[in-house]
Amino acid sequence: MKLIKSAFALSTVLLTSAAHADFLGANAEAGIFDSSDGSATYASLDIQHPIPLIPNLRMDVWDFESDPSGTDISHLDFTGYYGVGLLWASIEGGLTFRNLDMTQGSSSDSESVPMLFLAASLAIPGTGITLAAESKSISSFDSVTISDQSFKIQYQPIPVLGLEAGYRSIDQETNFLGNIDYDGYFIGVTIDI
């Protein structure tokens, strides 16, 4: 009986540790984006935790320079989200606050807008490959409309470090710049702990 109790206590501790290991973590991404309108750099930091009712946190930085028109656009996104995972699939939803800085010539403007955040991913077992899609959007908030969609493939051949490649499309309308669309491909590195 004592042996059974000890085995039960040990298995409970191990399962609890494993559960926390699955829900507590962070990942980061950084890379470059290229399109016919110009190029951009991006970086993000995502922190997940097991505390109920408090959303996971994510920060994204995006800096786009459009050579032909001399337009610079940068985004700083703060996202709070909740996620649900089942086997190798996960779905996330939440709210993003985007600080949008725009410069054209000697003029500049900035906007802060809330956006709906949705994301989904599917890991292919035994391959180190994950397919993911993400959407951030807002329609006519303070004369700003944004649709920001991305699709990517991530490959993690070794623990912690990986690569990603994908396609991103941003359709943005503001009073300052009017309607600007930029889409293209990106490639980057990922760190997952």
Image (cartoon, rainbow, N blue to C red):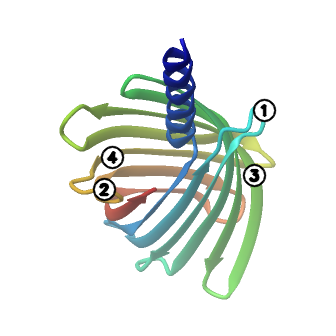
Which of labels 4 and 2 is toward the front? 2
Residue at mark 3 = 113
Residue 20, labelled with which disc? none
Q: Amino acid at mark 3?
A: Val
Contact, mark 1 vs mark 4 (Cβ under 8 Å):
no
Residue 87 x, y percent position in the rendering: 39, 22
Question: Between marks 3 and 2, how big is the CA–CA gap?
Answer: 36 Å
Residue at the image position 56 percent from the left and 39 percent from the top: 23
Amino acid type of the residue tagged 4 in the rendering: Lys
50 sits left or right of 190 in the view: right
Q: Residue furthest top?
A: 1
Judge whether 147 appears above or below 120 on screen: below
Q: Nearer the viewer, mark 3 or mark 1?
A: 1
Q: Earlier in the sequence, mark 3 or mark 1?
A: 1
Rounded to the nearest angstrom, the CA distance separating label 3 from label 4 is 25 Å
Q: Secondary structure at mark 2?
A: loop
Residue 32 falls in image quadrant: bottom left
Q: Amino acid at mark 2?
A: Pro
Q: Earlier in the sequence, mark 1 or mark 2?
A: 1
- The quadrant of the picture occupied by the N terminus is top right
Per the model, the C-alpha gap separating discs 3 and 1 is 23 Å
Q: Badge 3 local density, few (<14 within 10 Å), some, or many (20+)?
A: some
Q: Secondary structure at mark 1?
A: loop
Instruction: Give percent across and percent down for residue 84.
Output: 55, 26
Residue ID for mark 1: 53
Q: Which residue is mark 2?
A: 159
Residue to which mark 4 is pinned: 152
Q: Nearer the viewer, mark 3 or mark 2?
A: 2
The one of 115 and 44 positioned closer to us in this rendering: 44
